[in-house]
Image (spheres, helix red, strand yellow):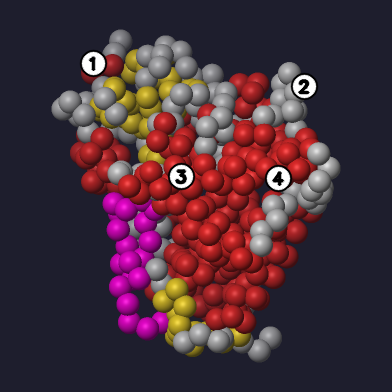
Amino acid sequence: MTNSSQMPKEEGLDHSLTLLREGYMYLANRRKSFASNIFETRLLGQKAICLGGEEASKLFYDNDKFMRNGAAPKRLQKTLFGEGGVQTLDEEEHRNRKTMFMSIMTPSHLEHLKSLTHKYWDLKGSEWEQKEQINLYDESRELLCQLACEWAGVPLNESELKKRTEQLTKLFESASALGPEHWMGRHARKELEDWVGEMVEQVRNKELSPREGSALYNFSIHRDIDGKLLDKEIVAVEVLNIIRPIVAISVYITFTGLAVHQYPENKSRLLKNEEQFQQMFVQEVRRFYPFFPMAVARVKKDFIWNNFQFEKGTLTLLDLYGTNHDPNLWDNPEVFNPERFEGWDESPFSFIPQGGGDFNMGHRCAGEWVTIEVMKVSLQYLSNKLDYEIPNQDLSYSMVSIPSLPHSKFIMANVRSKPQ
């Protein structure tokens, strides 16, 4: 029987800085060099097992073998996720909290989301006509901040739009940062949690009446496994776990604009406004471009998989980007090809840009449906509803910076609405 000592192992005291230097490619590079979908390394001063590929993804999302509590580094909880959020829960607590999130993912609520997305794209399109050029990343962040707050039932004054947009952006832009940028992310989270926490109190005191079915409404009245209302601080974390990921879709929207520009061979099908092809195009953007590099968990109990020993408490990382570019799973993975999703069986373990597994009770991101719907509407505007020029600029993007973006953040000039 094979044990962990025979698992491919990266030698050295700690490779945390190497991970930061290599970014999205750290796990994929070592999977390739070891010719293995599993290897051992040391990160954050501790042993870590790294996994990639479809079978490893199935293993990683087995809730009997892995837990999320205590897995995410504190620096991520202090910036990206918030403390006590759904990503850090297991078993019955996780199922209860996941039910709360799924309560706002009904067809009617998602339809409302789509209508709001059209509304704010129309408003932004009118604004852009008054400008010589715009920065798609910056503009879409504001668009999505307005959209997210309205859909979540969170009042947002026009005067505070820029402030809240920048604070929400800091949550995901500072996730892998060190030094002052990290501390700015922590400060932004504190201010945002205080802001939303006050609203939770107002809802419970009947001083504020958000739309029924919205995140602020549903989360404020949700009860935990003991039948108690969640602490207002936890509700604030979870409401932000709706708003923050929607603002982060700005990364995908920027890459969508880039894909429309750089792969004009898709233009004829996009102009036909076929919903099926729009879905395929969006999914290929999510597969092809970098978003989340990895997911983290800890081994829940000792077990053996493929003759390798997993010990309770071991930090474990799943290669999201590398799995989405795995040549064993995808034909020509470095080629942008939306048609690969035609007739695709939607495996929840080979296509994992926002994590894998089951939506309802598993750890697959509940906001994935939101991401897809917002991206589809955004694609319609970028390919069909707006005319614009793309001036010379640096459209390359880094595989080290997290999140990655085109260096120019995609500049559009002379934006005009097309006659419909």
Q: Quick check: is 391 in the magenta stretch?
A: yes
Mark 1–mark 2 contact, CB under 8 Å? no
Q: Which residue is mark 4?
A: 199
Q: Nearer the viewer, residue 78 or 24?
A: 78
Residue drawn at point x = 23 percent, y = 39 percent: 17
Q: Which residue is mark 1?
A: 5
Question: Which comes sooner in the sequence, label 2 or label 4?
Answer: 4
Q: Quadrant of the C terminus?
A: bottom right
Q: Nearer the viewer, mark 2 or mark 4?
A: 4
- Residue 38 falls in which quadrant of the image? top left
Q: Which residue is mark 2?
A: 227
Question: Which comes sooner in the sequence, label 1 or label 4?
Answer: 1
Q: Quadrant of the N terminus?
A: top left
Left or right, 81 with reference to 390: right
Q: Which residue is mark 3?
A: 187
Q: Residues within 10 Å of mark 3 (few under 14, many from 20)?
A: some
- Rounded to the nearest angstrom, the CA distance separating label 2 from label 4 is 22 Å
Residue drawn at point x = 36 percent, y = 66 percent: 406
The answer to whether one can see residue 41 in this image is yes
Question: Which comes sooner in the sequence, label 1 or label 3?
Answer: 1
Please state the extent of the stretch shown in magenta in the rendering.
Answer: 390-408
Q: Nearer the viewer, mark 3 or mark 2?
A: 3
Q: Nearer the viewer, residue 252 or 287?
A: 252
